Image (cartoon, rainbow, N blue to C red):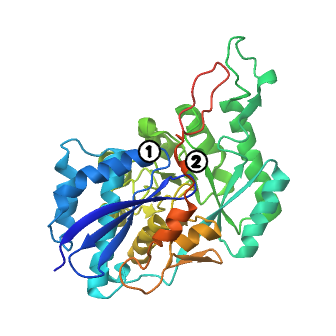
């Protein structure tokens, strides 16, 4: 069996926020690729991987579970976003190696496909109802069955211009304010419009992005019940997930949660108590294929479905890892889609194909995806990559932060 000889990182995208892991072995030409991207902490994740690497050199690449457990406990403190991301990148690469050694795709190693392709959902948006309706129609024509609907940015429909928000006089440059009541007024009208114009054929989702106070989150779930959403995403912040019990008592609007989860104690009670309908952990933040496969199996036992998180900051390697999990799991629900620029696709030959609302893996051994290192270096903009990135800073009328 092949042994690990070297673990390196490849930083790319124009802004340097993509980090790929390449695990080399003592077998000529045998290596594995994984995703350890973190839009906000790319340099920190690279440092973590460089710290972890010596622990794994000389170990058998095929001992994936043991290697996972070794890294998981190697720093004593665990379940942090940085360690999980570093661990996931290495874990994906080891699965890639195992598939190549076996001569079959990872989804075959995991039990074989349970579906022909992976249903994905699109992201429709507009600054007003007509723009949004037009965008939804565009995706319907492309073949999407499930479409996420947003009015502009996250929290759209809930922002009040500064001149109308009655803000304190000493605020610093705030141009608008998020208001729970405005959001509760706007969102039902948005879905009433879409259902009136498009009927109940399309399946709709919406991402609250944790903007609401908990009691208002419960109210929104109730107000949206007549519009039969496919799911309502991130209704509550991770700190307030106990409120999902009240949501369950009040309505049947399906709930999706989890893109900020990094600790199994966050998602386990929501699944085992059947408080959510879709778990949305990002594969790289959940600890990789090894850990997320276990989440998917747990979901099977409790009637919860998977909807692995992607988002615009993600990369084709993480997407491919999610697709392999989607192909084999009977708890699969839907997969968040992701579009990349042509030059970004060229970095990752063998990437999943997105067509007609479905993602298609290939039948190449391992993950079936590779990294063109020359193109990865060429697309990186050193000036952009030297900058720091932060999540949007939304605030209420008094200037207090809205947790994303």
Q: Which residue is mark 1?
A: 41
Q: Relative to 75, is 381 above or below?
A: below
Circle nearer the viewer, 2 or 1: 2
Q: Nearer the viewer, residue 279 or 174?
A: 174
Q: Is residue 14 left or right of residue 162?
A: left
Q: Nearer the viewer, residue 218 or 117?
A: 117
Q: Residue at x 64, y 70 (%)?
A: 342
Q: Secondary structure at mark 1?
A: loop
Q: Percent position (x, y) of residue 40?
A: 48, 44
Q: Earlier in the sequence, mark 2 or mark 1?
A: 1
Q: Is residue 179 left or right of residue 332?
A: right
Q: Percent position (x, y) of residue 79?
A: 29, 46
Which quarter of the rendering shows the N terminus? bottom left
Q: Which mark is residue 384?
A: 2
Q: Which mark is residue 273?
A: none
Q: Percent position (x, y) of residue 171?
A: 67, 16
Q: Relative to 392, is 248 above or below?
A: below
**Is residue 314 something that shows in the picture?**
yes
Tell me whether the residue at label 2 lies in contact with that at label 1, contact meaning CB atoms closer than 8 angstroms: no
Q: Nearer the viewer, residue 133 or 273?
A: 133
Q: Secondary structure at mark 2?
A: helix
Which quarter of the rendering shows the C terminus? top right
Which residue is at the far top? 169
Q: Is residue 337 left or right of residue 152?
A: left
Q: CA distance from mark 2 to mark 1?
A: 14 Å
């Amino acid at each position: 069996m092949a042994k690990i000889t070297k673990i390196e990182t490849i930083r790319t995208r124009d802004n340097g926020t993509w980090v790929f892991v390449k695990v080399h072995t003592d077998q000529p030409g045998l290596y594995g690729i994984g995703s350890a991207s973190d839009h906000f902490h790319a340099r920190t994740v690279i440092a973590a991987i460089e710290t972890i690497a010596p622990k794994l050199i000389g170990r058998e690449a095929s001992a994936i579970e043991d290697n996972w457990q070794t890294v998981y406990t190697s720093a004593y403190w665990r379940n942090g976003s940085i360690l999980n991301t570093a661990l996931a990148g290495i874990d994906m690469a080891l699965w890639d190696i195992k598939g190549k050694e076996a001569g079959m795709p990872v989804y075959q190693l995991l039990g074989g496909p349970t579906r022909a392709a992976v249903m994905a959902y699109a992201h429709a948006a507009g600054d007003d109802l007509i723009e949004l309706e037009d965008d939804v129609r565009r995706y319907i024509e492309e073949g999407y069955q499930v479409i996420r609907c947003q009015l502009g940015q996250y929290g759209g429909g809930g922002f009040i211009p500064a001149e109308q928000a009655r803000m304190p006089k000493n605020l610093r440059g705030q141009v608008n304010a998020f208001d729970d009541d405005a959001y509760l007024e706007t969102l039902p009208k948005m879905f009433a419009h879409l259902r009136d114009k498009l009927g109940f054929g399309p399946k709709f989702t919406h991402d609250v992005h944790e903007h609401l106070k908990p009691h208002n989150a419960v109210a929104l779930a109730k107000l949206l019940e007549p519009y039969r959403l496919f799911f309502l995403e991130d209704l509550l912040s991770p700190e307030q997930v106990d409120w999902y019990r009240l949501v369950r008592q009040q309505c049947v609007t399906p709930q999706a949660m989890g893109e900020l989860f990094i600790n199994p104690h966050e998602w386990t009670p929501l699944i085992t108590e059947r408080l959510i309908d879709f778990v949305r952990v990002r594969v790289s933040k959940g600890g990789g294929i090894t850990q997320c496969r276990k989440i998917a199996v747990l979901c099977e036992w409790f009637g919860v479905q998977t909807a692995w998180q992607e988002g615009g900051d993600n990369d084709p390697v993480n997407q491919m890892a999610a697709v392999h999990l989607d192909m084999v799991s009977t708890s699969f629900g839907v997969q968040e889609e992701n579009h990349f620029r042509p030059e970004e696709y060229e970095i990752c030959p063998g990437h999943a194909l997105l067509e007609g609302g479905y993602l298609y893996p290939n039948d190449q051994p391992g993950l079936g995806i590779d990294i063109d290192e020359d193109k990865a270096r060429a697309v990186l903009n050193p000036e952009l990559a030297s900058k720091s990135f932060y999540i949007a800073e939304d605030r209420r009328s008094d200037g207090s932060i809205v947790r994303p």
